Amino acid sequence: MIDFISRRLLAVLSLCIFWSDTISASPATDLTPQQLASIDRFVLAEMARERIPGVAIGIYSRGKILLAKGYGLANIELNVPVKPETVFQSGSVGKQFVSAAIMMLVEEGKVGLDDSITKYFPNAPKSWQTIKVRNLLSHTSGLAEYESDERTGPNGPFYLRLDFTEDQLVEKIEALPIEFKPGDSWDYRNTNYVLLGAIIHKVTGSFYADYLQQRIFKPLGMNATRLISEADIIPNRSSGYELVNDKIQNQSWVSPAFNSTADGALYFNVLDLAKWDQSLYGTTLLKQSSLDQLWTVFPLTDGKPNPDKYGFGWRIDAVNGHKLIEHGGSWQGFRSQISRYVDDSITVVVLSNLGPSRPHQFAQVVAGLVNPALEPPKLIAIEDKHPELLSRLASFLDQLAAGKEVKDQLSPELAVRLTPDIAPYMAQLLKPVWPADSRYLVTRTERDGISFSSYRISKNTESRIVDFGLAPNGKISTFGIHPDPDVR
């Protein structure tokens, strides 16, 4: 599902990296009382800062649980605390299970990565003939995003409160435009994984979630992991929350159809994800060659790596030279993050029940508390050769803080993600530091004529990092506000 205003929007060029997860690093030792106390202090402070009702933290070493702990409330109305057993929605972290299932079918010869997807969707338009299965897995298909405001609103073809069969959803997707030639570019589209779920169904005869149960969840003993259901009685289910006009409210209701798509509609908890993490250090589920494909940055047609360093259902990166394989998710008042530091045999999972929260930043800091070598480099002021960008950002922040309409300043892709409920939350994060006493540039990269910048914005003792990207046409292509990782 959509991962709003996430760090994936701040894409940078990188070398195409091939990483195998067959590593010789020893399992990490147990956490010390001092480390546990530091993690507690950080998590509770950030929850208060971001107004998050509940969080579950999982820290594993090759599947061995070093910490599985709940903080805050799983349900505000009933005053139910979060426990390790508490079940959260997956959001797009669920995509990695779908990519693994596809690779199982590839190993069995039932699906080919280079198959045209028209093999599975014979009624699709001719323009789909050049789209391959590997393009769906890597978000390089060029298919439009079905989950935009316009398309999922009351007048759109994918109105979230209407129920559809899988065949009806596929038929509606077949009517969407192709926005770039397959393989020529990269853009994160939930559409791709909805289709992958349909392919699993067509090939196996089992609904994709049933196939995941049969081939992954049941064999690994992931007993709490399953498809979302509003109707079923599900032990330890948490509630999802949104911030609307500065008030915490229950998650918005969507039809069963949109809580059953393969782009991220699962329940799981930090105990089950330890079992998943353990399986990825061996070949229990997949051959090593298949795992390697999941964790290889997918190249575009021109041979260059895609700008988000995305593989098949995973993003591949590094922190201080330490390999990182990760993914985040967002759906229905929940946010999730899994970060696997495979050089160090450390995995951090963060599950939150507030839609606009930022578990990716939680995971970064927690990893550094477990192993200081994984702490991101400190952000320091650098020379700003384009001060006009900061002036443009300041004007934008003035308008955002004042609650003014800003959508006309955004690129179409960013406008989809800066939704009416997200913009007020961003304004709330901005409030303690704006107007700022201090503002300066800490990072800047250039790609395809777009300048991606991060600024530290400070006032009194409060500080935030603001990401800002401006396209050549003057539209804002990247925007995000998140806690300053150097202030804890």
Image (cartoon, helix red, strand yellow):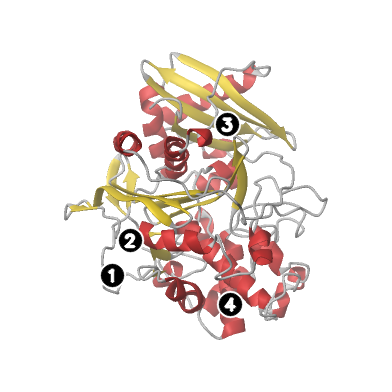
- Is label 1 in contact with label 4 (beta carbons under 8 Å)? no
Q: Which amino acid does label 2 sit on?
A: Val
Residue 269 in view of the camera = no
Q: In this picture, is 406 found above or below 206?
A: above
What secondary structure is marked by label 3?
A: strand
Crowd around label 2: few <14 · some 14–19 · many ≥20 (10 Å): many
Q: In this picture, is 125 found above or below 154?
A: below
Q: Distance between the residues labelled 1 and 4?
A: 25 Å
In the picture, the disc for residue 234 is 1
Q: Residue 210, image x and y in percent?
A: 46, 79
In the picture, the disc for residue 87 is 2
Mark before the other along the chain sequence, 4 or 3: 4
Q: Going 63% across and 37% down the picture, which residue do you hit?
A: 321
Query: Label 3 belongs to which residue?
Result: 468
Mark before the other along the chain sequence, 1 or 2: 2
- Is label 2 in contact with label 3 (beta carbons under 8 Å)? no
Q: Distance between the residues labelled 1 and 3?
A: 41 Å
Q: In this view, does 128 lie to the left or right of 248?
A: right
Q: Distance between the residues labelled 2 and 3?
A: 34 Å
What secondary structure is marked by label 1?
A: loop
Q: What residue type is labelled 3?
A: Phe
- Is label 4 in contact with label 3 (beta carbons under 8 Å)? no
Residue ranking furthest to the right: 302
Q: Which amino acid does label 4 sit on?
A: Ile
What secondary structure is marked by label 4?
A: helix
Mark before the other along the chain sequence, 2 or 3: 2
Q: How far apart are marks 1 and 2 (CA)?
A: 9 Å
- Is label 4 in contact with label 2 (beta carbons under 8 Å)? no
Q: Going 49% across and 69% down the picture, which residue do you hit?
A: 261
Q: Going 63% across and 62% down the picture, which residue do you hit?
A: 291
Query: Label 4 belongs to which residue?
Result: 200
